[in-house]
């Protein structure tokens, strides 16, 4: 079932880049202490920066499994939303982290109320701790992985082989989010979405634990003036460049 879903979400991605022919990914990529062998790509950035699209395309191109870590926070948020729980109570948020499963295609995961709750509960240390191991295990799997989120290059996989920090202006991101919401048949008003994006940026960047920030060794990719295809091509180029110099 899960494999079928993965296949389905993969099938939605129509990207015209052939899989990487390079044999380099078959090499062993180790940490400095030689303990890890997979090739890990960390993609971080704010909401609607394009990091998800880029991460999925990189995973497809380099033949690696992909985890959208924001979905974990969204899944916990959705559980609280459906319970009618209070996201301001850390203990309730932590309780929602117990044994949660989710359907990545569930439209409600991307709804605005769930986005707001996800942003709130992701500031709790206990919630971040509860979700940490699942992400680290995914990053540590044999062969490697692509993970996207806010703290992949700084907390989840600080030893990642490639780190990209994807960004775009708040205005461009708001336009993208409105388009996305309307395409999904959900209400989306530019001014409200822009305010929300700015508020969420502020919360994500200023929270005490695992704030959104560019790792010192991450490459910056500003997608404000790029189409999705151009952003993907640039991301592939940056990864290939790192591979060539590894
Ligand atoms: O990337 P996203 O918009 O789907 O993420 C949803 C929320 O989860 C967002 O408010 C930030 C938070 N998040 C986080 O704190 N750390 C991550 N690694 C991924 C997401």
Image (spheres, rainbow, N blue to C red):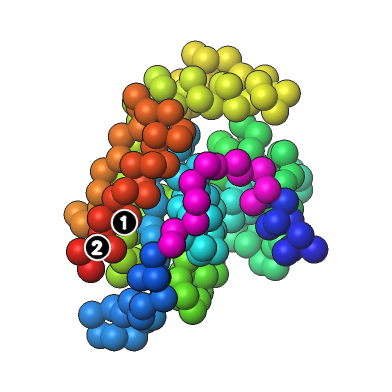
Q: Which residue is identified by label 1? A: 240
Q: Which residue corresponds to the image point at 25% horizontal and 85% vertical from the top-left?
A: 33
Please provide the residue range marked out in magenta.
10-21
Is 33 placed above or below 245 here? below
Q: Quadrant of the C terminus?
A: bottom left
Q: Which mark is residue 72?
A: none
Question: CA gap, disc 2 to disc 1?
Answer: 6 Å
Camera-nearest residue between 228 and 224: 228
Residue 155 appears at what percent x and percent y? 35, 63
Report crowding for label 2: few under 14, some 14 to 19, many 20 or more residues within 10 A (C-alpha).
few
Circle 2 sits in a helix, a strand or a loop, which is it? helix
Q: Which residue is identified by label 2? A: 244
Q: Are marks 2 and 1 in contact (CB under 8 Å)?
A: yes
**Apparent side of residue 167 relative to residue 76 in the rendered image (left or right):** left
Considering the whole magenta stretch, tell me its main secondary structure: loop
**Apparent side of residue 111 relative to residue 161 in the rendered image (left or right):** right
**Residue 144 is drawn in which quadrant?**
bottom left
Q: Which residue corresponds to the image point at 54% horizontal and 42% vertical from the top-left?
A: 15
Camera-nearest residue between 231 and 113: 231
Say whether residue 142 is magenta. Answer: no
């Amino acid at each position: 079932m899960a494999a079928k879903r993965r296949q389905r979400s993969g099938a939605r991605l129509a990207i015209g880049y052939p899989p990487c022919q390079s044999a380099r990914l078959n090499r062993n990529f180790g940490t400095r202490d030689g303990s890890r062998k997979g090739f890990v790509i960390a993609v971080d950035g704010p909401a609607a920066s394009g990091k998800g699209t880029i991460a999925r395309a990189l995973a497809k191109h380099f033949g690696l499994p992909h985890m959208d870590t924001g979905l974990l926070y969204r899944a916990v948020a959705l559980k609280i939303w459906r319970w009618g729980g209070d996201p301001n109570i850390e203990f309730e948020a932590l309780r929602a982290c117990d044994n949660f499963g989710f359907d990545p295609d569930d439209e409600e995961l991307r709804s605005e109320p769930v986005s707001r709750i996800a942003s709130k509960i992701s500031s709790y240390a206990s919630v971040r701790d509860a979700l940490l191991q699942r992400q680290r295990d995914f990053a540590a799997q044999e062969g490697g992985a692509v993970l996207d989120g806010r703290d992949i290059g700084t907390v989840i996989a600080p030893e990642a082989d490639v780190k990209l920090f994807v960004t775009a202006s708040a205005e461009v991101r708001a336009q993208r989010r409105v388009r996305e919401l309307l395409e999904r048949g959900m209400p989306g008003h530019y001014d409200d979405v822009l305010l929300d994006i700015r508020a969420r940026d502020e919360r994500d960047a200023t929270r005490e634990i695992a704030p959104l920030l560019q790792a010192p060794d991450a490459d910056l990719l500003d997608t404000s003036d790029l189409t999705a295809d151009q952003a993907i091509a640039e991301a592939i180029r940056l990864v290939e460049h790192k591979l060539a110099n590894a």
